[in-house]
Amino acid sequence: MPDVAVSQPLPVPVSAEIHPSAVNAAVAAGQTMTMNSSSLYVGDLTAEVKEALLFDLFNAVGPVASIRVCRDNESRRSLGYAYVNFHNPADAERALDTLNHHELKGRTIRVMWSQRDPAFRRSGVGNIYIKNLEAGIDTKSLYDTFSLFGNILSCKVVPNGESSYGFVHFETQEAADAATEQVNGKLMNNKKVFVGPFVAKKDRSEAQQPGEIVFTNVFVKNLPESYGTEELKALFSSVGVVTSCVLTRDSNGASKCFGFVNMEDPAAAVKAVEELNGKEVDGKNIYVSRAQKKKERQEQLRQKYLNIKLERIAKYQGANLFIKNLAETVNDERLRTEFSRFGTITSSRIMYDEKGNHKGFGFVCFTTPDEAAKAVAETNNMTLDNKPLYVALAQQKDERKEQLANLYARANAMRTMVGQPNMPGQPVYPGNPMFYQPNMPQQRGMVYPPQPAGRRWNNQAAAPGFYMNPHMAPAQQRPHRGGRRGMPMSRGAAPQQQPRMMPPQQMPMQPNMELNSTMLAEASEPEQKEMIGNRLYSLLLPAHNADLSGKITGMFLEGMDIAELLHLLEAPDALNQKVNEALIALASNEEHQKA
């Protein structure tokens, strides 16, 4: 079809006969609306464009009243568009004519009249969509091509690989209709383009409900390797007219066994899916379905797996157990054997990393919640291969994160407490701080309670770093009353035996002294824990108050052996991790007490 000669040559040749009457009617309709505004919208700006640069550019056309680059409220970064206000509407119109599609900081800007009415912008009146544009067509070329049909408010081309797409917004719907009628299906730069009314994304998704989607493009996979394009076309020609088909191949030219077939009409495409899906071809059952965009397919798969996951969670609610602190010697079979005595196990699994290393935890799922509850009651803290197990009901990731966040918040609140006494009903762990009487020889292991406020040695004045020895006899842990300062008496009237004085060389170790193997080798196990506890307490005290440091130290001494305690002294990271676990345990216990 020959090109049509017009008064102004098209920058992009359109191989179609454009009727002058249609063009004149569209132009006349477009001229019915005049812009009396002096405000312009400037879009497609780079982040480097500031008000000063825009002022210099637009003020050269005419006096500028104000300029505002729109920015994000929090980051204050440019949103890529601005508003320019002129004193005179004529200057604004001249700036629109001369600066639209001007290149600024390496990017072509768009200049259009500022439309303050959001209803007009969202109505879609006069807005058309053009796809399958040749890659060489830019925004200015598209603007010049479609300006024959009427005044254009906005025009934009979006590059998309070998073919691009664009938008043209006319002043009137008549101009948009004329452009759609004249250009749709015609060749632009030897490529057939589609031109139609613009439809917002939300309206497209609402219109495309399952069962109502009209399609002609079909996806086929699991094809025989011997199949080529001709065989694929012949297969689908049995159900309708094939307009095009493509078989995907790798870099070596070998078939990837899947491809796409475009049918002439939607009815043939539906028939192809119904009749050819699952059909056996050369010993292979092929799969045929509607061709989908990657985003749509991913959303469907995500929803599918989410539904399966929710069904599984609802089915096994309260019956799935989480077990951690497992020894590396425990495998899937051993885990199932240990828990099978509590009921029927549907699945059990030990978790490994990508390198096959044992991660120390796993899951066991029972058929009923009662069996799971029985297993939790009898196996939590049970020793398996010399390691105490932690067994609890499995939680979803989001639920567990929320619970841990609450516990960490309470733990951080406990960190900030200074000198808080134990509240009634609050648990007191071994290690509740009890201080040695300073500068006074005493029997190894003997401790004294904190002095009352107003005396010489209170909690703050006492020698730091000393705590209640968890291995003391009950009589030694009992608080004393009466007696002279530094010389405690028992509760009764009869005086008890005074603490035996130690030789100077047997003075308790000060908290700032470093431990060595000789000191530990000469001490018994209770004395070793006391020495390590003194050192741990002194390390904790700068970051926590005395009461909290004592509790944490007591928890360490009660639940860990000598080797693990020494590891904490040598590895600050391990110590910090254990401290965080202890704080979470304390916060959880306090919350349980309140409940």
Image (spheres, rainbow, N blue to C red):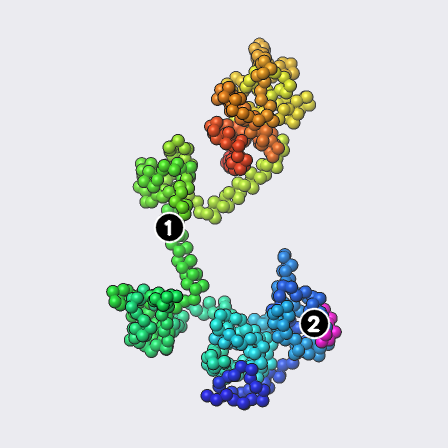
Give me the residue at 49% from left, 20% from top: 524
Q: Which residues are magenta?
A: 60-66
Mark 2 Cα-neighbour bin, 10 Å: few <14, some 14–19, many ≥20:
some
Residue 348 drawn in magenta:
no
Q: Is residue 594 above or below residue 122?
A: above
Q: Return the residue nearer the eye: 439 or 472.
A: 439
- Select label 2 or label 1 by which is in front: 2
Mark 1 Cα-neighbour bin, 10 Å: few <14, some 14–19, many ≥20:
few
Distance of mark 2 from mark 1, alpha carbons? 63 Å
Q: Return the residue nearer the eye: 120 or 228.
A: 228
Q: Residue lying at the far left in this picture: please name it.
A: 283
Residue 104, position in %: x, y? 64, 70
- Disc 2 + disc 1, Cβ < 8 Å: no
Q: Which residue is mark 2?
A: 57
Q: Amino acid at mark 1?
A: Arg
Q: Is residue 562 left or right of residue 81?
A: left
Residue 234, position in %: x, y? 30, 75
Residue 63 drawn in magenta:
yes
Tag 2's secondary structure? Answer: helix
Q: Which residue is mark 1?
A: 312
